[in-house]
């Protein structure tokens, strides 16, 4: 049986202009073996995913409204949360090991929404079936994932150490030219 989550709400620290990193690291040290850290923050703490990932913790992320986020950091050797509880930090709609190299690389990190999604969709629609495109986006592209699913495309994504996302999209349909 797993231990209950260790709860840490850093929203008050952030509201006061403080830096919660030391409180988070103290909480990690205080965890019992196999215990998860349940963190509440006023932003999605993507850089923390990498820091705690290097210590063997996997994040489960959930938008709890009003700009607040719940992240449960679960040790690798602990049982996972029930399916459907939270979004993965590395969204993926495909688990095949063999993917072709991207024929197009797009960097949309400096663009304002919705332009990164528009350009990614335009790019994937120009591909032949099973070709791939790689797109760098400034944040997790949840709306893009919805559009790709509806259009029958597959993707893999990962949050890069710098905090942006790299999405590789595999075309699942007919290529067509976009004006």
Image (tube, rainbow, N blue to C red):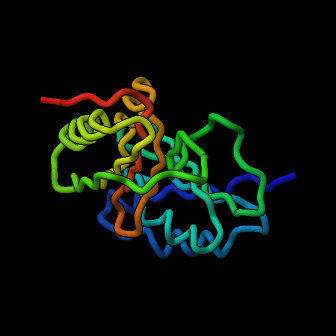
Residue appearing at x 51%, y 51% in the figure:
99
Q: Which of 64 and 110 is in front in this view?
A: 110
Comparing 34 with 17, the one in front is 34
**Residue farthest right in this picture:** 1
- 94 and 68: which one is in front? 94
Instruction: In this rendered view, identify the residue nearer to me: 123 or 62.
Output: 123
| Rendering quarter of residue 121 | top left
Q: How many labels does the image show?
A: 0
Query: Quick check: 123 above or below 43?
Result: above
Could you say where residue 125 lies in the image, as x and y percent from the top left?
29, 33
Q: Where is residue 89 in the image (x, y as percent from the top left)?
A: 51, 51
166 over 174 or under it: above or below? below
Q: Residue furthest left?
A: 179
Left or right: residue 32 versus residue 124 is right
Query: From the image, which quarter does the C terminus lie in?
Result: top left
The residue at 79%/68% (across/down) is 33
The x and y percentages for residue 142 are 39, 38
Residue 114: where, in percent of width, then height? 20, 37
Toward the top, the furthest residue is 150
Residue at 49% across / 68% down in the picture?
50
Q: Is residue 142 left or right of residue 95?
A: left
The residue that appears at 45% across and 72% down in the rendered structure is 21
Using residue 30 as the reference point, say whether residue 141 is left or right of it.
left
Picture quadrant of residue 76: bottom right
Q: Is residue 123 visible?
A: yes
Would you place residue 94 above or below residue 105 in this image? above
Rendered view: 119 above or below 161 = above
Say whether residue 138 is visible.
no
């Amino acid at each position: 049986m797993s231990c209950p989550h260790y709860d840490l709400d850093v929203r008050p620290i952030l509201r006061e202009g403080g830096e919660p990193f030391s409180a988070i690291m103290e909480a990690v040290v205080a965890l019992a073996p196999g215990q998860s850290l349940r963190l509440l923050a006023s932003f999605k703490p993507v850089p923390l995913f990498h820091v705690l990932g290097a210590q063997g913790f996997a994040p489960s992320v959930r938008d709890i409204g009003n700009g607040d986020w719940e992240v449960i950091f679960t040790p690798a050797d602990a049982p996972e949360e029930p399916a459907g509880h939270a979004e993965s930090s590395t969204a993926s709609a495909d688990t095949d090991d063999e993917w072709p190299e991207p024929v197009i690389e797009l960097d949309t990190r400096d663009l304002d929404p919705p332009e990164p999604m528009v350009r990614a969709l335009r790019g994937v629609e120009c591909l032949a079936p099973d070709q791939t495109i790689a797109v760098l986006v400034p944040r997790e592209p949840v709306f893009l994932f919805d559009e790709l699913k509806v259009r029958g495309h597959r993707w893999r994504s990962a949050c890069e150490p710098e905090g942006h996302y790299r999405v590789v999209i595999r075309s699942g349909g007919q290529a067509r030219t976009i004006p």
